[in-house]
Image (cartoon, rainbow, N blue to C red):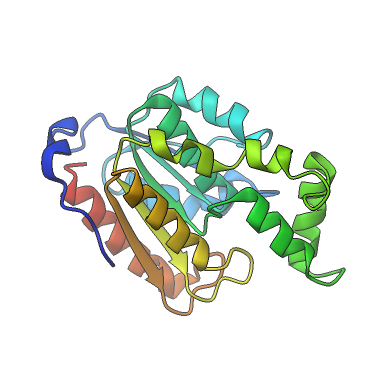
Amino acid sequence: MGHHSPGGIDTLYSSGNSGWRAVVFHGSGSSPNSVAWLSRIISMRGFSVDAPDSSGDVIDVAKRYAEKGFDLYAGHSRGGSIALIASALAGRGAVITVGTPADRLLQARWLSLHPPGSVQRMLYQDMENRLGNPWEDPVPYDKTSLIRYIRYVRGPVLIIHGDSDPIVRSYHADILEDFLRLVGAHVEKILVRGMGHAPRREHVEIIRRAIHDFLERYGL
C-alpha cells in the first residue's frame, strides 16, 4: 500500500470526529443493506452515517449528495463511483471506494465478453438496457465515467480492492490510483488478498483496520 503524506491538507480536517457526517452508497442492483458492513465500520469512528437508496443515474445521485456537503463519501462498486464524483462536485470530503470500476466503458465492454447466464453478463445487460451498446455507441458510458471527474477530487482517497474480484478486475484500482496521483490527489490503495467483489467476514477486519488508519492519518 502506498500513499502520499497528508502534508498541507491536514488543515482541512480538525482532529477528532465529533459531528463528522458520512454517506455510504451501495452498488448496482443492490440496497443499503448490502453496505451495512461499510456503514458500521465508518460509524465506529463516530461518524453520523447516511446510507441512502442510491439507485438511479450515477451523476444525478452524486449531484444530490454533493450539495449536502458530507465530510466523507464512501461506496462499494458503482457506489464508489458515486462517492468519488460527489466528492469531486462538492470540492471537498474524503473518499473510500471498495471494488470500484475506474472507467465505465472499460468495465462494460469487459462484462459484455462473458457468456449468457453469468453474473458478469447479467450486469452488462442491465448497463446496456440503460445506456445502450458500449461497442456501438461509447458516448453515454464516457459521459458518466468517474475518470471525467477525477481532476476535481480534493479530499484524500482510500482505494480498497480484492485481488480476486471477478466483477471489477483489480487493474481498475491501479488505474484509479495512477490517475489520482497524476492530478495531485492524496491517495492510498490496499489490495485485499483472496477477496472477491465483496468482502467475506475474514476480509472485513482487514478493511476496518485500513479505514481506521486512513481516517486517523487525516484527522477524521
Residue at the image point whose x is 67% and y is 51% from the top = 105
x and y percentages locating residue 10 in the rendered image: 14, 38
Q: Quadrant of the N terminus?
A: bottom left
Task: In this rendered view, identify the residue nearer to me: 111 or 99.
Answer: 111
- Residue sitting at the far bottom: 194
x and y percentages locating residue 162 in the rendered image: 48, 70
Q: Quadrant of the C terminus?
A: top left
Residue at the image point whose x is 42% and y is 75% from the top = 202
- Residue sitting at the far right: 116
Camera sees residue 127: yes
Task: In this rendered view, identify the residue nearer to me: 212 or 1.
Answer: 1
Camera sees residue 26: no
Q: Residue 9's quadrant in the figure?
A: top left
x and y percentages locating residue 44 in the rendered image: 30, 49
For the image shown, how many numbered marks are present on the structure?
A: 0
**Figure check: 158 above or below 146:** below
**Figure check: 181 above or below 20:** below
x and y percentages locating residue 34 in the rendered image: 58, 53
Q: Residue 212's quadrant in the figure?
A: bottom left
Residue at the image point whose x is 37% and y is 48% from the top = 180
- 191 relative to 18 in the view: left or right: right
Residue at the image point whose x is 30% and y is 44% from the top = 185
